[in-house]
Image (tube, grey):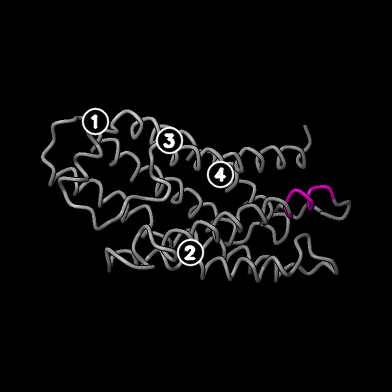
């Protein structure tokens, strides 16, 4: 199996994360997310009454998260093809690994909240809040990935870059788009609450648009006869 085919397979495996992520949230009943303004009693009731679907949905989310490793590996491989063994390739590998954990840890916190049906409502609320604040509020790793992708595309010295220059601008706009999630720690209502139009919807659209666009253009790049192989 040649390197280009392996890269394409990795990209497609990584892309499988997106539909599984949507299915997981829908199964849990969390698309859109529950309001951060919900009382402890209501949150505890939700976990008690919907315990089965929440645990199943989070199980799907947790199973899907490691697929991001294949997408991250494809990004690192592309960076090495473009610029060689630069520090950017190492940085991308590290933040890609961190991103996976930033999905898994909150999901396990929610699983702990749903594991027993008789927990104190205040404790359930604490776990619920902690999970969502981590899920939506930790955006720095994704932003670093997006900026690295933009820098690599701009730095490609080929007359026709492996990935078109316009994708670099999309990466930068996507980084700005996900930034809004970090503000969910400041409010329980409004556009930057964790279920708000900026903190959730703009973040989700920006991240998925970036991931899909980079995937499509990387797949196209693997088929180019001049893709080269710096990889030093």
**Magenta stretch containing residue 218, yes or no?**
yes
Q: Earlier in the sequence, mark 4 or mark 2?
A: 4
The residue under the point 61% across, 58% down is 210
Q: Which residue is mark 2?
A: 178
Q: Residues within 10 Å of mark 3 (few under 14, many from 20)?
A: many
Q: Nearer the viewer, mark 1 or mark 3?
A: 3
Q: Residues within 10 Å of mark 4 (few under 14, many from 20)?
A: some
Q: Is residue 96 above or below residue 197?
A: above
60 vs 71, left or right, is: left
| Residue placed most toward the observer, 32 or 207 | 32
Q: Which residues are magenta?
A: 217-223
Q: Nearer the viewer, mark 3 or mark 4?
A: 3
Q: Nearer the viewer, mark 2 or mark 3?
A: 3
Q: Earlier in the sequence, mark 2 or mark 3?
A: 3
- Disc number for residue 115: 1
How far apart are the alpha carbons under marks 4 and 1? 26 Å
Q: Which residue is mark 4?
A: 18
Q: Which residue is mark 3?
A: 27
Name which quarter of the figure residue 109 lies in. Answer: top left
């Amino acid at each position: 199996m040649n390197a280009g085919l392996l890269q394409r397979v990795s990209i497609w495996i990584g892309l499988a994360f997106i539909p599984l992520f949507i299915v997981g949230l829908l199964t849990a009943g969390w698309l859109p997310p529950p309001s951060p303004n919900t009382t402890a009693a209501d949150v505890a009731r939700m976990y008690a009454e919907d315990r089965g679907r929440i645990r199943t949905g989070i199980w799907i989310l947790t199973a899907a998260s490691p697929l991001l490793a294949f997408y991250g590996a494809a990004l690192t491989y592309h960076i090495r093809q473009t610029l060689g063994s630069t520090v950017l390739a190492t940085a991308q590998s590290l933040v890609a690994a961190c991103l996976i954990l930033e999905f898994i840890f909150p999901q396990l916190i929610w699983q702990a909240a749903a594991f027993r049906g008789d927990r104190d409502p205040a404790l359930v609320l604490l776990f619920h809040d902690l999970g969502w604040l981590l899920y939506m509020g930790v955006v720095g790793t994704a932003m670093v990935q997006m900026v690295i992708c933009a820098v690599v595309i701009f730095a490609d010295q080929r007359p026709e870059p492996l990935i078109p220059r316009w994708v670099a601008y999309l990466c930068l706009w996507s980084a700005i788009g996900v930034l809004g999630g970090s503000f969910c720690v400041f409010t329980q209502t409004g556009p930057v609450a964790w279920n708000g139009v900026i903190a959730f919807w703009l973040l989700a659209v920006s991240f998925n648009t970036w991931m899909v666009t980079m995937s499509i253009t990387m797949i196209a790049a693997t088929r180019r006869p001049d893709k080269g192989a710096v990889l030093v």
